[in-house]
Amino acid sequence: MTAEAAVAVPALVVFVAALLWALTAASAQIQCVDAARAGARAAARSEPRAAAVEAARSAAPEGARVTLGRSDDLWRVRVEAPTPGPHGIALTLAAEAVAPAEDAMPGGEVP
């Protein structure tokens, strides 16, 4: 094995590992966005709070924290989750979705 290969192979392994970590983090971020949207839709349909939170949790990545709140005529759902993979790279992924409450609309219809 040459000296160049002795340096290149470990560097390539680290690069591939970082790439795989970035792909799983991007996937978890997309799950957070989908979970926030699902929770906001459920809350906007006047489903019980527990059902809206459960809708968000079921779509969220493992270990996610779901926050549901209402301000005026809007339901807000925030989903936060740790990045998957090694704990040395600790980032918090987050997404928020907002939906108008159907019961606040004239005639109960969303525009």
Image (cartoon, rainbow, N blue to C red):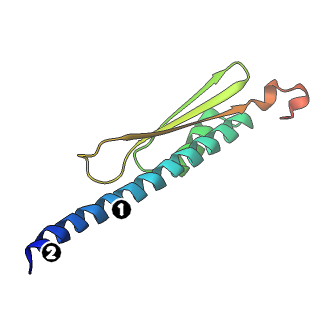
Q: Is residue 29 above or below residue 71?
A: below
Q: Is residue 66 above or below residue 28?
A: above
Q: Nearer the viewer, residue 42 or 37?
A: 37
Q: Which amino acid is tagged 2? A: Ala
Mark 2, other Cα within 10 Å: few <14 / some 14–19 / many ≥20: few
Q: Which amino acid is tagged 1? A: Leu
Place residue 13 in its image quadrant: bottom left
Q: Position of residue 104 (x, y in %)?
A: 80, 24
Q: Residue at x 60, y 45 (%)?
A: 55
Q: Earlier in the sequence, mark 2 or mark 1?
A: 2
Secondary structure state at the residue bearing disc 2: helix
Q: State the residue position of label 1.
A: 20
**Quadrant (top left/top right/bottom left/bottom right) for the C terminus:** top right
Residue at the farthest top position: 72
Q: For the residues carrying marks 2 and 1, which lies nearer the camera in this image? A: 2
Q: Position of residue 9 (x, y in %)?
A: 19, 71
Mark 1, other Cα within 10 Å: few <14 / some 14–19 / many ≥20: few
Q: Nearer the viewer, residue 99 or 93?
A: 93
Secondary structure state at the residue bearing disc 1: helix
Place residue 101 in its image quadrant: top right
Q: Residue at x 87, y 34 (%)?
A: 109
Q: State the residue position of label 2.
A: 5
Mark yes or no: residue 89 visible: yes
Q: CA distance from mark 2 to mark 1?
A: 22 Å
